[in-house]
Image (cartoon, grey):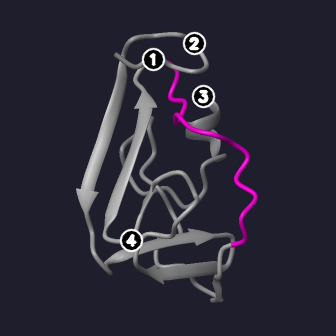
Amino acid sequence: MKICQRCKSLRVLKVQGKVSDCFAMCMTNKKYNGYVANDIGIGGGDYIEFSYCLMCGQIQGDFPINNPIEFEEEDDCPFPYISCYKCGRRCGDPVDDYHRGN
């Protein structure tokens, strides 16, 4: 049984999926499309696989990731916003009054 490397909880969830070449990720204004990038802690090749703690949210593994990733420059990332944990909508400004608790 795996325990969380940060909080020592036993509530560690393992996620696995076959994405083949339908994998995409973004960082700032750069994107990567293709197979799951190796050596970034989430699987590799056709498969995405990682574990994370349901108590503290820590992704399990060895960090920081020092391997360079070949990104393409792009003005508009295909996933510029994430779903807000507080309201569930795709938020363009996560620091507006609603999200500050005002």
Q: Does 100 sit above or below residue 67?
A: above
| Residue where numbered disc 4 is placed | 45
Residue 25 drawn at (x, y percent): 50, 70
Q: Amino acid at mark 1?
A: Met
Residue 73 drawn at (x, y percent): 67, 89
Q: Amino acid at mark 3?
A: Gly
**Residues marked 3 and 1 touching at CB (< 8 Å):** no
How far apart, in angstroms, are the residues tagged by discs 3 and 1?
23 Å
Q: Which residues are magenta?
A: 55-68
In this rendering, would 13 be left or right of 70? left
In this rendering, which labeled residue sits more in front, label 3 or label 4?
4
Instruction: Let me know if residue 52 is in the magenta part.
Output: no
In this rendering, which labeled residue sits more in front, label 2 or label 1?
2
In this rendering, which labeled residue sits more in front, label 2 or label 4?
4
Q: Amino acid at mark 2?
A: Cys
At x 50%, y 70%, the residue is 37
**Considering only order in the chain, which callout, 1 or 4, is on the residue closer to the N terminus?**
4
| Residue where numbered disc 2 is placed | 7
